[in-house]
Amino acid sequence: GESVGLHLPTLSVQEGDNSIINCAYSNSASDYFIWYKQESGKGPQFIIDIRSNMDKRQGQRVTVLLNKTVKHLSLQIAATQPGDSAVYFCAETHTGANSKLTFGKGITLSVRP
Amino acid sequence: DAGITQSPRHKVTETGTPVTLRCHQTENHRYMYWYRQDPGHGLRLIHYSYGVKDTDKGEVSDGYSVSRSKTEDFLLTLESATSSQTSVYFCATIDSSKDGYTFGSGTRLTVV
């Protein structure tokens, strides 16, 4: 697999702490949002998604919050583990025929042991 | 990722030469996408396909063409490679009935 050495903002957290990764999206017409995780040498992997008719969705150790008023998306990771170290991307799209996914630039999460 | 194979995994080519990258999927997904990933830019859409012989441009399509002659294969061609096309290229698919895109493992292309 491949990845790039992205010059991205970095969030450093202590193992066991909760992490919050934020994303501002641009298109007020977007109605579907996804968080992806990209580990070194791999393609992006789906973590969790949310539709615009919701403001919160929970998965296993992860929660996504959506604030449509300010066009803000966040990913919360509970009890962060070393395996959570990766680059995280938010993505947005307007669902429908021929929909296209637009990605944010990404944030590097670094977990300190 | 399971079901999506990109080839080659790595390629070095000279400026001005044509290059074709292949994305093969076994999921019978209708939609397929080509993205490039560069430092400071994240993932940007090059071209996408919404069915056999149905393709459209993304935000960074200049210098690239695509073809989809059958459901399982989506080809990305650089007609005359330039150094600015040095990048990591990712293919993705989506099943219209499901959520989220599935990505391949990427192709690192270096144009010298």
Image (cartoon, rainbow, N blue to C red):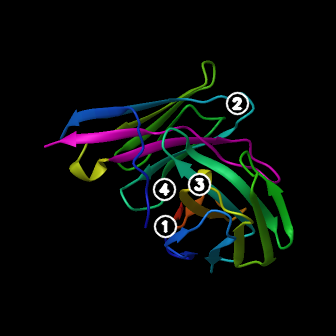
Establish whether labels 3 and 2 are both on one chain. Answer: no
Expressed as whole percent of the image width and height from the top left, the position of residue A98 reads 80, 54
Q: Residue furthest top?
A: A70
Give neighbour class at mark 3: few <14, some 14-19, many 20+ (Cα, 10 Å): some
The span from disc 4 to disc 2 (Cα, nearest Å) is 22 Å
User: Is label 4 in a helix, a strand or a loop?
Assistant: loop
User: Is label 3 in a helix, a strand or a loop?
Assistant: helix
Establish whether labels 1 and 2 are both on one chain. Answer: no
Sooner in the amino-acid sequence: mark 4 or mark 2: 2
Expressed as whole percent of the image width and height from the top left, the position of residue B17 reads 67, 69
The span from disc 1 to disc 2 (Cα, nearest Å) is 28 Å
- Residue under label 3: B83
Hey, what amino acid is under mark 2? Asn
User: Is label 2 in a helix, a strand or a loop?
Assistant: loop
Query: Who is closer to the viewer here, B24 or A53?
Result: B24
Q: Compared to A28, does B12 lie above or below?
A: below
- Residue under label 1: B105
Which stretch is magenta? Answer: A86-113
The span from disc 3 to disc 4 (Cα, nearest Å) is 25 Å
Q: Is residue A103 visible?
A: yes
- Residue under label 2: A27
* Disc 4 versus disc 1: nearer the observer: 1
Hey, what amino acid is under mark 3? Ser
Q: Residue at x 59, y 54 (%)?
A: B83
Expressed as whole percent of the image width and height from the top left, the position of residue B51 reads 82, 69
- Residue under label 4: A44
The span from disc 3 to disc 1 (Cα, nearest Å) is 22 Å
Give neighbour class at mark 2: few <14, some 14-19, many 20+ (Cα, 10 Å): few
Q: Residue at x 70, y 79 (%)?
A: B72
* Disc 3 versus disc 4: nearer the observer: 3
